[in-house]
Image (cartoon, helix red, strand yellow):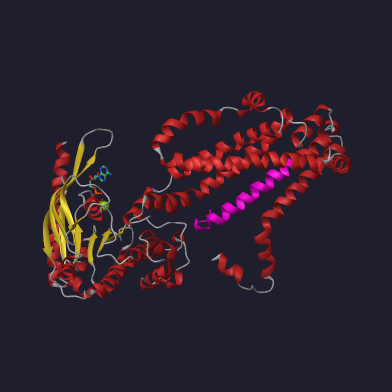
Amino acid sequence: MTAITSTQGTVAGEGRTFLFKRYYRPIVSTLAVLGFLLLWEVAVTLGWVNGRFTSQPTQIYRAALVIFAEDDFGWHCGVSFVSFALGFAMALAVSIPLGLYLGVSRWGRLFLEPPLMALYTAPRIVLLPILIVWLGIGLASKVAIVFLGAVFPIMVNTMAGVRGADHRLATAARAFGATPMDIFLKVLVPGSLPAILMGVRLGVGRGVLSVVIGEMFVSEAGIGHQIMTYGQALQFSKLLVYAFTISLFGYGLTVAVRMLEDRIRNWRPSS
Amino acid sequence: MTQTLQDMATSGRMEIRDLSITYRKPKSDEVFTAVDGVSLTIEKGSFVTIVGSSGCGKSTLLLAMAGLIPKASGVITLGGLEVTKPGRDRAMVFQDASLLPWRTVHGNVRFALELQRWKRDDIDERALRYVRMVGLGAFADYHPHQLSGGMRQRVNIARALCVDPDVLLMDEPFGALDAQTREVMCDELLRIWERDKKTAVFVTHAIDEAIFLGDRVVVMGRNPGHVRDVIEIDLPRPRTNAMLDSAAFVEYRRRLREYIAADLAALQMVEALV
Ligand SMILES: Nc1ncnc2c1ncn2[C@@H]1O[C@H](COP(=O)(O)OP(=O)(O)OP(=O)(O)O)[C@@H](O)[C@H]1O
Ligand SMILES: [Mg+2]
């Protein structure tokens, strides 16, 4: 029904409420963020908290100007982005096919599920020293740690999506002569797409976290490296500039995946 | 020439001989006989309904006709050929939840044509024709969750008919619908069926539905599932709602009720013993 009203012209006056209805989410979110920044600013200015340790929005803004001017900001972002993009791409390429396979193959699960689950639940940071020995300090180690961070949530969700698929749909397809490949491609894969995308969204979070952690330990550059450096120098305003940058990147990507999920979910009853 | 004549005589005629079907009992190696020694002939172009109390093996029998489950013994032939797996000569309408939720009404009907590898260039149009035939032309772009239960079953019927099967198998297609909608759907199903009189097998709980639709009503009993009787329904076609109150209809209804009541009484006795 909303689809119909949104394409038809509305009576004058209704237009404004309609705009508000449509955009109330971003409006409310923006107000919340602005309110928080204001509170932060005031709390430091009035001495409720010690600005030396909490910094302050205006200080961060000034620090940002300095960083943009003197810090090779773009280069550090680029370094982080390349590690993230490579690791994440590899994770997608491995996790989705593997998750689909494990979803349909009982034998595959018997063999691979225990080790994969052990890796999934273990804190992967413990592997970092081993990775450094294998791959050295630099891009390869970072890509590997991003890969390890993102690959499991996507794989596990993909597998769950396939296994949770409605078997009645597969039976109906078989009644019409579907081959196993038909069932896989036309029933299981589209049916598990929402779960796959949810995994991708979780994977983005893990991947962003991993790239920062990786750079803290195994990099001479990148956002994580800068965060570590400014942290040790107790320059929290500058640290927060980088922290916000990476958060914004992760958030943007998460929102993008969310939008994709919403598009694909339009066949679902809206919740 | 003789070949085609023979095809015309036997395609769509289904023969079931001494059919038994067993299931493995959950968590044990024992088998459970769901259908035992069923023999049945379904003539080409006839409408056969199957009634029986819950759990007597109606769905099991239908799944076997569809070729979806293995037989323990016996044979099923369709048009002289043995049925061992699903085929283009049969199509099935399930009780519920068998539409792909991510496809539209049109997409769901098209799905069946895709699976049967119909020629690409005319499947869109063919699917749309069948969507219109069941009265859903205006809803072709709706997704299943946006439809009522009755509309969803129309889609299921359109999907089964569009592949042009010889035999239409229906497992309680209106089971989830309210009484009024059921009546409307039955009228409609008959209207569609009268056009090309495909062989139809229709499972239902509802005795009136079974009489109203069927040329013959197969009464099944339980423990294990077997055919108790086959009742010829000698009412003229097209069937009308006025017939529901005719003396003949009332008599058929009485006979069928007796069977079902006896079946349930037997069940209660068994349950009282164990
Ligand atoms: N997959 C299965 N595994 C084991 N037993 C089964 C299975 N499917 C059905 N059965 C058993 O077979 C018997 C017949 O089941 P069936 O579904 O054919 O009954 P039905 O006549 O269609 O019942 P209803 O009218 O309730 O749909 C039941 O006792 C049921 O428990
Ligand atoms: Mg049943």
In depth, the one of B35 and B87 nearer the eye is B87
Q: Residue visible at 23% across and 57% down?
A: B205
- Principal SS element in the magenta part? helix
Q: Quadrant of residue B151?
A: bottom left
For the image, the number of numbered tags is 0
Residue lying farthest front?
A: B1
**As drawn, B9 above or below A217:** below
Residue A126 position in % (x across, y down): 62, 24
Q: Quadrant of the C terminus of chain B?
A: top left
Q: Residue visible at 13% across and 65% down?
A: B252
Magenta stretch holds residue A253: yes
In depth, the one of B219 and B124 nearer the eye is B124
Compared across the picture, whether A84 is left or right of B207 comes to: right
Q: Quadrant of residue B195?
A: bottom left
Compared across the picture, whether A105 is left or right of A120 comes to: left
* Residue B235 visible (yes or no): yes
Q: Quadrant of the N terminus of chain B?
A: bottom left
Residue A229 position in % (x across, y down): 81, 30
**As drawn, A128 above or below A203:** above
**As drawn, B1 above or below A208:** below
Residue B83 position in % (x across, y down): 21, 54
Residue A187 position in % (x across, y down): 43, 52
**As drawn, B202 above or below A81:** below
* Residue A244 visible (yes or no): no
Q: Quadrant of residue A221?
A: top right
The span picked out in magenta is: A246-271
Magenta stretch holds residue A138: no
